[in-house]
Image (cartoon, rainbow, N blue to C red):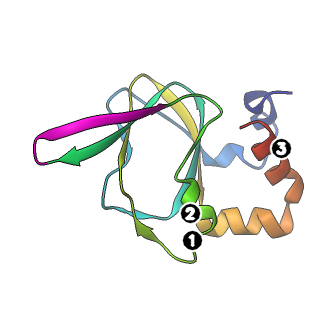
């Protein structure tokens, strides 16, 4: 079963969002409070500099964004911005929900990480 099939009957479904091209998932400097997993689409990671935006990487389906939040003890400023390049679906797991799944629903966490 792939991740998108699992979402059809999963407790993760409530955390799925779909955005249009050009939509920012988060911005550089914003406090990181969530982990993101791309399901479909493509996300550009951007560094904002004095001379403009610079794409430093792309995130594809099955890849994480903001994984540092897993080990963080508190929110921290994002070092990059993330912008959908095409219509993109993703899971956004707030830190408190991530912790709740770790302790109360390890099966969901295992499936999530196995498919990424």
- Extreme residue toward the left, this view: 51
Q: Position of residue 10 (x, y in %)?
A: 80, 43
The residue positioned farthest toward the bottom in the image shown = 73
Q: Residue at x 55, y 60 (%)?
A: 68
- State the residue position of label 2: 69
Q: Quadrant of residue 69?
A: bottom right
Q: Quadrant of the N terminus?
A: top right
Quarter that holds the C terminus: top right
Horizontal side of residue 4 vs 47, given as left or right: right
Tell me what residue is drawn at x 30 percent, y 61 percent: 29
Q: Earlier in the sequence, mark 3 or mark 1?
A: 1
Question: Label 3: how many residues lie within 10 Å, few (<14), some (14-19) or many (20+)?
Answer: some
Residue 22, image quadrant: top left
Q: Residue at x 80, y 53 (%)?
A: 109
Q: Which residue is mark 1?
A: 72
Asked if the residue at tag 1 contacts the one at tag 3, i.e. Cβ–Cβ closer than 8 Å, the answer is no
Q: Quadrant of residue 6?
A: top right
Q: Nearer the viewer, residue 13 or 65?
A: 65
Q: Which residue is mark 3?
A: 111
Mark pair 3, 1: CA separation: 22 Å
Magenta region includes residue 14: no
- Residue 52 magenta-drawn? yes
Tell me the mark number nearer the camera, choosing from 3 and 1.
1
Q: Secondary structure at mark 1?
A: loop
Which residue does the image show at 71% across and 68% down from the upper left?
Answer: 99
Residue contact at pointers 1 and 2, CB within 8 angstroms: yes
* Residue 114 on image: x %, y %: 81, 41
| Label 2 SS | helix
Q: Main secondary structure of the magenta part?
A: strand
The segment highlighted magenta reads 50-58
């Amino acid at each position: 079963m792939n991740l998108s099939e699992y979402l059809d009957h999963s407790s993760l479904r409530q955390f799925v969002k779909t955005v249009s091209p050009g939509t920012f998932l988060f911005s550089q400097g914003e406090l990181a409070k969530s982990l993101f997993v791309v399901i479909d689409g493509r996300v550009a990671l951007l560094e904002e500099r004095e001379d403009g935006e610079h794409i430093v990487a792309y995130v594809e389906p099955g890849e994480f964004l903001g994984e540092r939040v897993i080990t963080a003890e508190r929110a921290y400023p994002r070092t990059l911005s993330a912008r959908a390049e095409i219509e993109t679906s993703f899971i956004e797991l707030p830190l408190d929900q991530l912790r709740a799944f770790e302790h109360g629903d390890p099966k969901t966490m295992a499936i999530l990480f196995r498919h990424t």
